[in-house]
Image (cartoon, coloured by chain):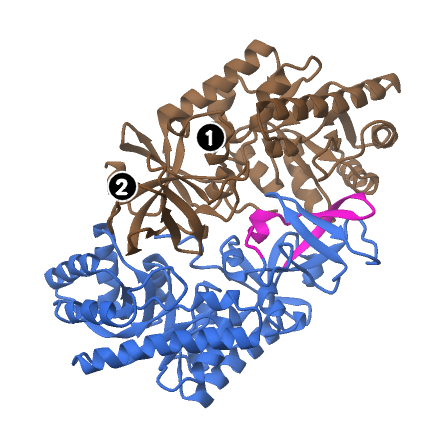
Chain colours: A brown, B blue
Amino acid sequence: MRVEELDTPCLVVELDRTERNLRDMAEAAQRAGVGLRPHAKTHKSPILGKRQLELGAIGLTLAKIGEAEVFVDAGIDDILIAYPIVGAQKYPRLLNLAERARITISLDDLEAAQALSQAARERGVAVQVLLEIETGFSRVGAQPGPPAVELARRLADLPGLRLRGVMTFEGHVYGGADEAARREITYRSAHLMLETAEALRAAGIPVEVTSMGSTPSAKLAMEVPGVTEVRPGTYVFYDANHVRFGLVTEDQVSATVHARVVSHPAPDRAVIDAGSKALTQDGPVLGARGLGLVKGLPGWRLDRATEEHGMLVRQGEAPPLRVGDRLEIIPNHICPVVNLYDVMYVARDGEVVDVWPVAARGRLQ
Amino acid sequence: MRVEELDTPCLVVELDRTERNLRDMAEAAQRAGVGLRPHAKTHKSPILGKRQLELGAIGLTLAKIGEAEVFVDAGIDDILIAYPIVGAQKYPRLLNLAERARITISLDDLEAAQALSQAARERGVAVQVLLEIETGFSRVGAQPGPPAVELARRLADLPGLRLRGVMTFEGHVYGGADEAARREITYRSAHLMLETAEALRAAGIPVEVTSMGSTPSAKLAMEVPGVTEVRPGTYVFYDANHVRFGLVTEDQVSATVHARVVSHPAPDRAVIDAGSKALTQDGPVLGARGLGLVKGLPGWRLDRATEEHGMLVRQGEAPPLRVGDRLEIIPNHICPVVNLYDVMYVARDGEVVDVWPVAARGRLQ
């Protein structure tokens, strides 16, 4: 079947481009001597996770216990759940996983750590832990320096937990106006994390892992001596925001939403059958407008969406569209988009060669 | 099991409040003598759809063939698919449905209508059609007046299609600054649609249905003589945007996302385990800020979210939170939120009494 024969809207992954994206990052990590631990939330597919491991990844990153269960069930045995696990309901499942695979979680709170420590001790299982450090994104994480050292001392003493090191998520890199700004943000986050790691070592706490996240900063973080691991996710497919950053061209993006024009109410407006239920409402970086890029048709802007309708607005001399025309949309942010689909159609040279389940879709807990 | 024992994040539907919301709208429609055809995209549950029919609804509205299939499979036999069906891949499934139930679709394009007409004629099935009229929302729909009349003439002549009337979606009512503005928008849309209906009748085209949408305008549209049908969806649960409109109080909202504080990095900031994958990025109406309301805690604003993290910011003297605290979030827009969950937990007086599948979740085609 040709991709043009697929009903719309649907998620299509181009296999050769995906493979190039995977290889490029794997080779960069190998050259830099830094561990690559891809965030598999982007694809939610053990098929792609295994390919990342075959290409040299040291393990995978996920956000939820339920996601990790899908990947451990598929035979993947080294997973960082980069999320603070809080709540007694979560411990039995986490500890089950920790018996079956090498599971590491992130923490930034002493009470949460104490509760997990007790559950782990009662079960007789050890959970690996990274202390999360806040380095500018203002999300989670202990403050670098003395507060982090004090918390690390306490964590290191808790039975049932094994503190392996520190991590940060430098998400504010997405606010960087250009490559230079993104480099400065990445270096600054790296240095805050690494200074804290040094302070931990000085306090007698071993630090074997210093881990950073994110696709736009991954190759920059690899340049910083002392960073042991990077956790990019989006690079498997890329998306419109990474095109805007100049990291890739439209043609290197390997996952798109195929949609169709269902209404053309005015010469300067067209409506497609992909709305927020197919594309999310995630916004663009760099002050851009719209909900994604219309591949190959820069003159049509995907201006806004309701649940089932995507509204295109014509800019200048863009070629006309007709009801029934098929378009490829490059979403702003691919990770939550993948989470909206049960399957991804896998294509090579325009031919559908496979259908992969989005196996960890909707694993919210 | 008590709702407090459910793992987070999860979607919880309070049964008695839901029943009150359903009854209130059903009674209003009955008093007004207007048909109620609820948009079931909000709940995606045949259990709730059947309850709406038991309370007097004349049928249901859905957006996608795949959604309608779920409801027809459950025994519901009168469905408006309020969406232009475009593309040859869709016709066999639509015509299968039209053989099993009374199916009406909306159209606004002659070529799309001609293609469907041919498929229906070949199959020997008639598809009921409403002509969609654009009355101010600038989404889909023919322009009211002569353009709509001309299109209706052509549609009425197409074999395999049976033109039953007109519909509009007055979605711009969500931009109305207050009740008076929303009333004016609703009346204006109603009059544009009804004038067009009159013009159709004058041209010899029978119009048995004049249908309008949306929860904030439904009771207003019922007041307009000549409107035969309303299609509110959100009223089954309501959401933060309808609280902001003053249509309901927080306590009348019957679906919330239960979440937990997983990090409390600073006295004025807390992070919950419900991010955009649990709440969407849909924004607030009326220039409000944030991604929803923290029920009972107006001093904590759900400021922003990444995929798995919701960031709360403390306003003034709000009571402190602790890691592990459970919160109820009232999302801005409940419809796409429901679409993120496989199940809804059904509660009465804090006790979980049932678990309902979100049966039409992810039915994108």
Q: Which residue is mark 1?
A: A243
Quarter of the rendering containing residue A196: top right
Give me the chain letter of mark 1. A
Instruction: Please give left or right for residue A122 compared with residue A308 in the image.
Output: right
Residue type highlighted by circle 2 = Pro
Q: Position of residue B255 (x, y in %)?
A: 59, 65
Instruction: Determine whether A297 is above or below A51 in the image.
Output: below
Instruction: Please give left or right for residue B124 compared with residue B269 in the image.
Output: left
For the N terminus of chain B, the image quarter is bottom right
* Badge 2 element: loop
Q: Nearer the viewer, residue B185 or B246?
A: B185
Q: Which residue is mark 2?
A: A319
At 49% from the left edge and 80% from the top edge, which residue is drawn? B219
Q: Tell me the magenta residue range.
A: B257-283
At 74% from the left edge and 50% from the top edge, which residue is drawn? B313
Separation of marks 2 and 1 at Cα, in angstroms: 22 Å
Q: Is residue B176 visible?
A: yes
